[in-house]
Image: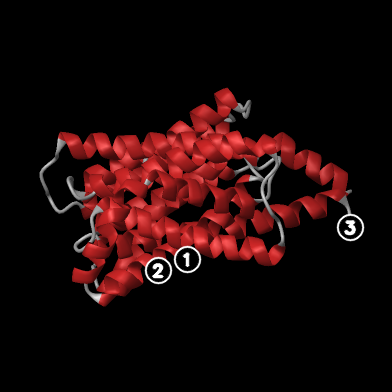
Amino acid sequence: MNTATAQRRTEAKALLAAAVTVVLWSSAFVVIRDAGSYLSPGVLAFGRLVTGALALGGVLLVRKEGFPPRAAWPGIITSGILWFGVYMVALNAGEQRIDAGTASLVINVGPVLMAVLGGWLLGEGFPPQLIAGIPLAFAGAALVGFASSGGGETSVTGVLLCLLAAVGSAAGVVAQKPALRHASALQVTAFGSAIGALVCLPFAGNLAGEISSAPPRAIGAIIYLGLFPTALAFSTWAYALSRTTAGRMGATTYLVPAVVITLSWVAVGEIPAPLSFAGGAMCLAGVAVARRKPKSDRQKGETREH
């Protein structure tokens, strides 16, 4: 197998992993919408992270991967605190205070920050395709958020919480990228989830009380969120991130709003507004542009193949 063919297969696997992440993270918004009626933001985040950490810990034992090397720990600890911990609590709390349109707009600052921090701190640069695609995808995500807004009141606290979530996710991704040079995607995700659970430990005392008064589907929501949008989706994210740049992976998350409205339509019968379809199309176009390789890179691949 020549180098170009092997590279294309690797990129195809990374793209598939990213697609799994996008679908599962999108489903999380639908599940959280219901579970948030019965569980507080901190309890929901703690239950989700403990479930995910236990599941991933079991896989680590089966695969006998053990602890990550020392060089990976700074990135794992940072991403565990900021992304797994701070992001999940802040997002859950923020979305209970502001309408969907405002939340969508503020949260989607995250991928922009990922591209900026990745270009600056990780030396990924600022490819023209990324610079062109991210504003288009951001505009599409904002349009979806505006179309799905229920007209709720805008809370300054809610906006600040969602902004904190966006900053936490961006900084966590940039910290996670170097860790993936030394540890596997499974190790980085498993120990990141465990650290996030430790960050949320202050909420553990309320877990039993809230679950006892919540309907069974709230418990099912915690289990689902822990196993799929956390354990599986964060692992596929780390796998894909280890094979591409933080900026391009961040741009991929702009597909989430389009998938969310589709899942909401299918799962709970929420009919999307016409603007949602237009916004979804803009998200798809923006991500396609942002993830497109420079012409010089494609020509190099073709030259190696021939």
Q: Position of residue 289 (x, y in %)?
A: 53, 43
Q: Quadrant of residue 223?
A: bottom left
Q: Residues within 10 Å of mark 3 (few under 14, many from 20)?
A: few
- The residue pinned by badge 2 equals 223
- The residue pinned by badge 1 equals 227
Image check: 132 left or right of 100?
right
Q: Position of residue 53 (x, y in %)?
A: 50, 58
Callout 2–callout 1 Cβ contact below 8 Å: yes
> Which comes sooner in the sequence, label 2 or label 3?
3
Q: Nearer the viewer, residue 188 or 239?
A: 188
Q: Position of residue 294 (x, y in %)?
A: 66, 36
Amino acid bearing label 3: Met
- Tell me the distance, in whole angstroms, between the alpha carbons under discs 2 and 3: 42 Å
Q: Position of residue 32 (x, y in %)?
A: 30, 60
Label 1's element? helix
Image check: 122 left or right of 64?
left
Q: Nearer the viewer, residue 59 or 154?
A: 59
- Tell me the distance, in whole angstroms, between the alpha carbons under discs 2 and 1: 6 Å
Q: Residues within 10 Å of mark 1 (few under 14, many from 20)?
A: many
The quarter of the image holding the N terminus is bottom right
- The residue pinned by badge 3 equals 1
Q: Is residue 38 shown to the viewer in this render? A: yes
Look at 18% across and 45% down and name the residue there: 98
